[in-house]
Image (cartoon, rainbow, N blue to C red):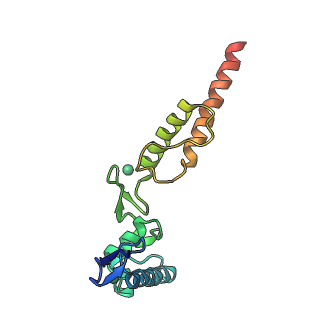
Amino acid sequence: MEDIRNCPRCGSVFVYRGRDICPRCVADEEDQFERVRRFLRTSPSATLEEVVEATGVSAELVLSFMRQGRLVATGGLKGLLSCQRCGAPIDDGQLCGDCSRELAREVDRAASAVREEGTPSSGSPAADGPAPPEGVVRGRMYVADLVKRRLTRDDK
Ligand SMILES: [Zn+2]
Ligand SMILES: [Zn+2]
């Protein structure tokens, strides 16, 4: 039995194969993504208005490419997205640096609670993939180092 749906983008009827929009719209979006990417390669400091004007791609779609992490904001596109946790302006993805660090810390805490477990698993649905930022790991090593040094000093 085929799953027949209406494309929310163009309204045409299509057979559902895991994508919410019809194959023609998928191809269309890919095409628009390519156009935006190519334009940004030649004009990396373009603003959103300039991208929309030059490529004919809607601002909403450009932002959605950035939110998907497919397009990393450069120049005039920086800070157009906002963090889904605190609302701070971000360049791509869903979380700002502070919030992803915060989430990494939570993951870290969870991981040390499990002790020696190789791969920390995040319980939060918002932590969609990103590895803990370097700073967190470095910070922890730094603290561990300090503790060690203090311990050896106390030993004297
Ligand atoms: Zn469609
Ligand atoms: Zn945030």
The answer to which of 30 and 83 lies nearer the viewer is 30
Residue 132, percent across and down? Answer: 54, 47
In this picture, is 105 found above or below 88? above
The outermost residue toward the front is 1
Name which residue lies at 43% across and 47% down: 98
Q: In this view, does 16 lie above or below 145?
A: below
Q: Residue furthest top?
A: 156
Residue at 41% from the left image edge and 78% from the top image edge: 46
Q: In this view, does 139 lie above or below 70?
A: above
Q: Position of residue 2 (x, y in %)?
A: 38, 76
Q: Which of these two is toward me, 20 or 154?
A: 20
Which residue is at a point 35% across and 86% down the rendered structure image?
56
Q: Quadrant of the C terminus?
A: top right
Q: In the image, 151: left or right of 128?
A: right
State the residue lying farthest toward the right. Answer: 156
**Residue at coordinates 55% horizontally, 50% vertically from top-left?**
131
Residue 79 point in image, percent of width and height: 38, 63
- In this rendering, the count of numbered labels is 0
